[in-house]
Image (cartoon, helix red, strand yellow):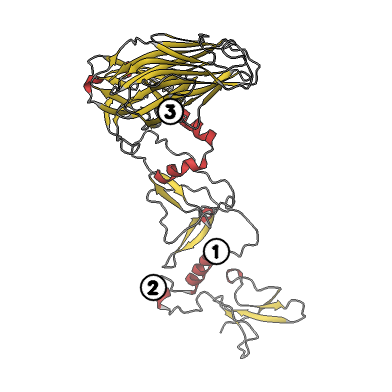
């Protein structure tokens, strides 16, 4: 046992490396008048009182602990000092509980842990990232595969997809995205959206769209009221055909005119021939359309005409067909006339080979407003035979009319039975009937017994076409490019030209002139 004789009073026990040997340290208790003695021997070992209750602490020395844990020994920890050093190093690596708030910019890392318990630093900016709160960038193989129905509700906010490639000229992009009423999105070839498109457009929008699609040319519904002449022969020569109707101003670059069989329909047209564009004369007025064709190249029969305006087709109807016959026989008539007048021998009506003219005369019957009495009738000699099929075109001209009277003077131009005796009555079997309106300044004409005629005030002329073909009359009346057509059964009789005039309130001149006629 060492001989210890030196006593040193201190407030705290010095560290092991700084203590003197063979001394007793008296350590004052904080806030107390007592001391605790610590003896240090010649080897520097600390000696303390052996007490049972542990009131005097035992200093933990680096070599006081014996390492027996095999896991620690396997890690190279065999002494207390090594254990203390390893423990301190690990404690230094532990995170303190944070008290400050931060953000992903100032604190860009978080701790991640794998299944083996290994930790790593991860980007804090990826934490909680999704399509709703981030500006994402994909990598190779990225994508989204739905495992169940998925809905994106924009709640009325803008939803945009930008930066797409322009594939307008890529033929492989032939499918549209489409949506039903509930918002469900699918793909379509465009058939259903385009079929339903017309129901969403106003009439003005439809017209604007069709016109734009047709290069700016009108695409209003086409119509053909008359074909002149309606009959052509199969001679090896060009024959001119004129169509009259509405919206016939076809675009020069995209139009087409075709001859179709009589039985053709809009759904099933049978095209016999197409008129070359170089043989067509277009008119910007939309009313007239003319072409020539050598009809010797197609069989005898009736043909419908089909028009294409670049957007839509139009097929003429049963009353506007072109008939091709083996031959036609044009002729110049040589007519004689008989007359009946309200007052005989007043010579109000004068007929010639191709015309008949009426000049009112108060000596025949005094002019009177509202008087519809027939005052003059003219009947020619035979114009067409019993068996003739024919085409006849007549011009109607009214002149020398004094406006201002409240009167509608009736007139008739047509054909009657050649055997009839002329009288002050309507002998016609097929006719154009009309009235001269003095108050309105014009005429109204009606094809035979048709219930609706062509009324046009401010013009005093019209054109009448009469055709007899195998027991059927067709009469067409045209005024200012508006045409009315009427058909009726034709009697097998010889026919004469017939004209009839009613009384007028003032001087009136009327002429009916044969413009064209032939048999076939």
- The residue shown at (49%, 43%) is 199
- Residue 356, how many percent across, how many down? 45, 11
Label 2: few (<14), some (14–19) or many (≥20) C-alpha neighbours in 10 Å: few
Mark 1 vs 2, N-terminal side: 2
| Residue 348 seen anywhere in this rendered image of the structure | yes
Q: Picture coordinates of residue 485 (x, y %)?
A: 43, 28
Residue 284 shows in this picture: no
- Spot the residue most to the bottom: 52
CB contact under 8 Å: marks 1 and 3: no
Residue 428 position by quadrant: top left
Q: Which mark is residue 92?
A: 1
| Residue on which disc 2 sits | 74
The residue singled out by tag 3 in the image is: 485
> Picture coordinates of residue 362 (x, y %)?
60, 11
Question: Upstream in the sequence, badge 1 or badge 3?
Answer: 1
Quadrant in the picture for residue 266: top left
């Amino acid at each position: 046992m060492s001989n210890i004789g030196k006593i040193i009073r201190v407030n705290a026990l010095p560290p092991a490396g700084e203590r003197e040997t063979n001394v007793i340290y008296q350590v004052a208790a904080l806030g107390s008048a007592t001391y605790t003695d610590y003896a240090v021997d010649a080897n520097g070992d600390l000696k303390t009182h052996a007490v049972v209750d542990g009131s005097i602490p035992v200093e933990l020395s680096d070599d006081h602990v014996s390492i027996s844990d095999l896991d620690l020994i396997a890690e190279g920890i065999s002494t207390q000092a090594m254990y203390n050093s390893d423990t301190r190093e690990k404690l230094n690596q532990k995170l303190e509980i944070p008290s400050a708030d931060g953000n992903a910019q100032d604190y860009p890392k978080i701790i991640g842990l794998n299944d083996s318990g290994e930790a790593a630093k991860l980007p804090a900016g990826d934490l909680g990232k999704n399509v709703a709160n981030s500006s994402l960038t994909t990598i190779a193989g990225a994508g989204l595969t739905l495992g169940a129905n998925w809905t994106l509700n924009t709640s009325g906010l803008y939803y945009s997809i930008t930066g797409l490639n322009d594939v307008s000229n890529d033929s492989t992009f032939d499918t549209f995205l489409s949506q039903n009423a509930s918002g469900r999105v699918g793909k379509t070839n465009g058939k259903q959206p385009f079929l339903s498109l017309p129901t969403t457009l106003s009439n003005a929008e439809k017209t604007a769209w069709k016109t734009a699609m047709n290069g700016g040319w009108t695409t209003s519904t086409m119509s053909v009221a008359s074909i002149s002449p309606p009959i052509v022969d199969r001679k090896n020569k060009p024959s001119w055909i004129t169509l009259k109707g509405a919206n016939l101003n076809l675009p020069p670059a995209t139009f087409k005119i075709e001859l179709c069989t009589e039985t053709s329909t809009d759904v099933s047209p049978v095209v016999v021939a197409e008129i070359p564009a170089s043989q067509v004369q277009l008119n910007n007025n939309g009313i007239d359309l003319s072409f020539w064709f050598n009809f010797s190249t197609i069989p005898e029969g009736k043909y419908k005409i089909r028009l294409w305006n670049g957007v839509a087709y139009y097929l003429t109807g049963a009353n506007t067909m072109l008939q091709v016959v083996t031959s036609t026989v044009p002729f110049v008539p040589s007519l004689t006339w008989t007359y009946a007048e309200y007052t005989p021998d007043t010579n109000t009506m004068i007929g010639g080979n191709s015309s008949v003219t009426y000049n009112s005369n108060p000596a025949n019957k005094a002019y009177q407003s509202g008087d519809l009495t027939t005052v003059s009738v003219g009947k020619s000699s035979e114009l067409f035979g019993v068996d003739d099929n024919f085409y006849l075109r007549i011009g109607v001209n009214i002149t020398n009319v004094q406006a201002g009277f409240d009167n509608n003077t009736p007139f008739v131009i047509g054909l009657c039975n050649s055997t009839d005796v002329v009288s002050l009555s309507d002998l016609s079997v097929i006719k154009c009937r009309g009235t001269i309106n003095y108050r309105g300044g014009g005429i109204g004409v009606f094809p035979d017994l048709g219930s609706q005629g062509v009324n046009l005030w401010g013009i005093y002329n019209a054109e009448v076409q009469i055709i007899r073909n195998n027991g059927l009359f067709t009469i067409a009346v045209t005024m200012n490019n508006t045409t009315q057509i009427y058909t009726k059964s034709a009697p097998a009789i010889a026919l004469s030209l017939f004209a009839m005039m009613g009384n007028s309130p003032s001087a009136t001149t009327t002429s009916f002139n044969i413009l064209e006629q032939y048999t076939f």
